[in-house]
Image (cartoon, rainbow, N blue to C red):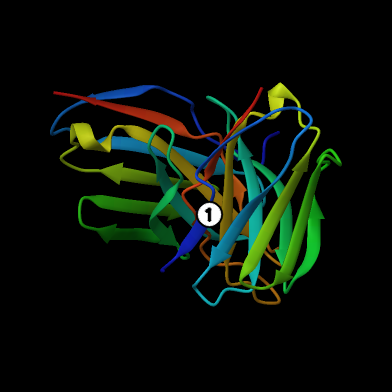
Amino acid sequence: QKEVEQNSGPLSVPEGAIASLNCTYSDRGSQSFFWYRQYSGKSPELIMSIYSNGDKEDGRFTAQLNKASQYVSLLIRDSQPSDSATYLCAVNTYNTDKLIFGTGTRLQVFP
Amino acid sequence: ETGVTQTPRHLVMGMTNKKSLKCEQHLGHNAMYWYKQSAKKPLELMFVYNFKEQTENNSVPSRFSPECPNSSHLFLHLHTLQPEDSALYLCASSQVTLTSTDTQYFGPGTRLTVL
């Protein structure tokens, strides 16, 4: 079982719709959760971090964490073509100095 | 300079060459990382340095040799590479405590092509 799992996609949504990206993780000791966006040929950039159960909103982005079910999701409201990218979920577990990355979900927003 | 910088941004080398990639972080972090990302593949963690000490070597071939002289600088020395080593090499840094690590910030990457 992979430590951090994401559907590779592509997830295709029309412009203006809500894109929902999901991530599950295997280690119940995981403490910190991150969503990165990576455009083709570029480096990952941080979108959101979340540390406690519930929702965290930042502009059009909402991260949701459910530790009991071991999943974290990212909602993108009013999706734009410029949101088309690969979204990486990353998880940090207790007492480690590294993040475990998922393989990423490719999002395509069409006009 | 701000954030994490990497040089060179692009590198083309032959299989017999020796070259080095450089990474510098200006964030006051204490941990630095090298990742490899091949075309359409996920990130592969190569090395982790925590307080200048290597804490992870993820079964990386010896033709890749990391060096971390201080918490702000990280090098990746390359020699006798293979064409399959062509990839985007990413450096990242983060602040690590005794029990966890916070957000990793990535540099822009070095696009390496091995002929």
Task: Decide if residue B12 is on the left or right side of residue B105.
Answer: right
Q: Quadrant of the C terminus of chain A?
A: top left
Query: Relative to A97, does residue A86 appear above or below in the rendering?
Result: above
Q: Secondary structure at mark 1?
A: strand
Kindly indicate the quadrant of the structure image that contains residue B64.
Answer: top right
Residue A29 visible to an observer of this rendering: no
Residue A49 % position (x, y): 43, 60
| Tag count | 1
Residue situated in front as seen by the camera: A51 or B92: B92
Query: Residue B7: x, y in percent?
Result: 54, 52
**Residue at 49% across, 54% down:** B107
In the picture of the structure, the residue carrying the numbered disc 1 is: B6
Q: Residue at x 42, y 39 (%)?
A: A87
Q: Quadrant of the N terminus of chain A?
A: top right
Identify the residue at image location x=72%, y=74%: B51
Query: Looking at the picture, does residue A35 appear above or below residue A4?
Result: below
In this rendered view, identify the residue nearer to me: A15 or A24.
Answer: A15
Asked whether residue B98 is in view, the answer is: yes
Q: Is residue A25 left or right of residue B18?
A: left
- Relative image position of residue A4 (x, y in whole percent): 60, 41
Q: Residue type at mark 1: give it.
A: Gln
Q: Horizontal placement of A83 versus A35: left or right?
A: left
Q: Residues within 10 Å of mark 1 (few under 14, many from 20)?
A: many
